[in-house]
Image: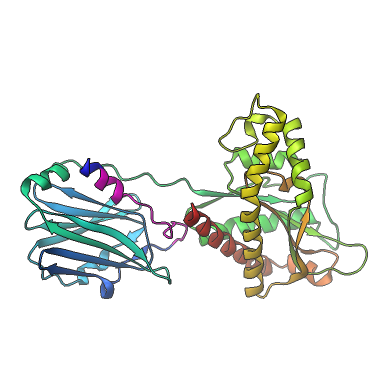
Amino acid sequence: MYRLLLLLLAALWTGLAAPLVAESARIDPARTEVQQLWRGVEIRIGLSRGVPYRAVFHQGPPRITFDLRDADLTAFDQVQLQVKDITSTQVEPAGTGWARLTMYLARPLLPGDISMSINEDGSAQLIAILRPASEAAFRDVALPAQETPELPADPPPFRVVIDPGHGGHDPGAEYGRVPEKTLMLAMARDLAAALPKAGADIEVVLTRDSDVFVGLEERLRRARAAGGGLFISLHADAVTEGEAHGATVHLLSPSSRQRASQRLTERHDRSHLLEGHDLTGTDDRVAHVLLDLARQSTSPRTERLARGILTELRAAELAVNSRPIRRAGFSVLKAADMPSILLELGFLSSERDRADLNDPAWRQRMAAAIAQAVTVWAEAEDADR
């Protein structure tokens, strides 16, 4: 039982260590030390950020292995070891995306405590306190010499579905040389390129990658079929009266939520209404309630993303409309279980916005800002689970 508890403890996924950043965690020799205690050893491994880890004890010879995901441990050789209970150390790869630090023990030691602390700046420290143990107690916990448990499988990537508005026979807004459908496809491709750079475990799916018509409900169906965790529909509106300028984010309005639930239960295949739940055969009222409950969780998460995007746009000195968050009943916002936003990147009726949208350099700046916001949001989502 103790061995099982140890293996489960050691495979922890630290909440703030979501592997959504491209750069590996680096060991910090200045914050890494191994000290001999009066009874046992204290090990502190400083890291540039928190990572998933596990610690496993082995027999023949006695040793402890620390496996860390997305970590670069090569600088550990700069750490001075003058500890009688640890005879030597070894750093090596432990499988795809994992690094292993092995410490060979001069006598049986067992954990008094193993934990990872996360600092406010995101840096971390893996701390292990090892205490003397009897040969029998060590054999009860440590794995046989040649036995090594498999490393935990990588979590599935976070999948963002990008929806370029309009397409095919539906050009969208038409001002100047290039219609909305063409600009949104170009913007979608720029965002698709920017997202993996911002987050290593982010995958991107486009609802269309050519000039074809895709119905509004078909766009959401494709997003669900792809296992989307976030849906971003890209548009560039136009106004015929007055002036409008800058980006806006549209969220599903409260008044549209109940109507959306009713229409979904009436018109759609119920096996695909909620991720992980087959509502086939469910009473209309029950299905309606379940969809509304799902939206109670999805709506605040979506609003956090919308505000995060606007923060990043302002930080990048990209134009934001004077009414940046708006609420509507657009079909592409009606998924109950998937945060969904409609992002108006600007107004084609504005000469300034039209020039920006036609500028590849501006689109790349916009894509980078959105990607940064999505990455920060996704990391916070993972930490909250």
Q: Position of residue 50 (x, y in %)?
A: 37, 62
**Residue at coordinates 57% horizontally, 41% vertically from top-left?**
227
Q: Is residue 220 above or below residue 235?
A: above
Residue 302: x and y, percent?
A: 64, 55
Corner quadrant of residue 177 = bottom right
Position of 105 with respect to 361 (left or right) is left
Q: Please identify the dominant SS of the magenta region.
A: loop
* Highlighted magenta segment, given as a residue range: 5-22
Q: Of residues 342 and 275, which is closer to you in this image?
A: 275
Image: 134 above or below 191: above
Q: Quadrant of residue 281?
A: top right
Colour mode of the rendering: rainbow
Q: Is residue 376 left or right of residue 130?
A: right
Could you tell me if residue 316 is visible in this image?
Answer: no
Report the residue at 67% width, 33% height from top. 287
Percent coordinates x, y for residue 226 in the rendering: 59, 41
Residue lying at the far right in this picture: please name it.
Answer: 241
Residue ID at (69%, 54%) = 341
Image location (x, y in percent) of residue 11 = 32, 49
Query: Which residue, as the protein is rendered here, is positioned at the far top?
Result: 281
- Is 381 a magenta residue? no
Q: How many marks?
A: 0
Quadrant where the image shows the N terminus: top left
Most foreground residue, 13 or 88? 13
Query: Position of 214 compared to 240: left or right?
Result: left
- Please tell me which residue is depicted at 9% across the width and 47% down the height of the picture: 60
**Which quadrant of the figure has residue 101?**
bottom left
Residue 190 visible in rendering: yes
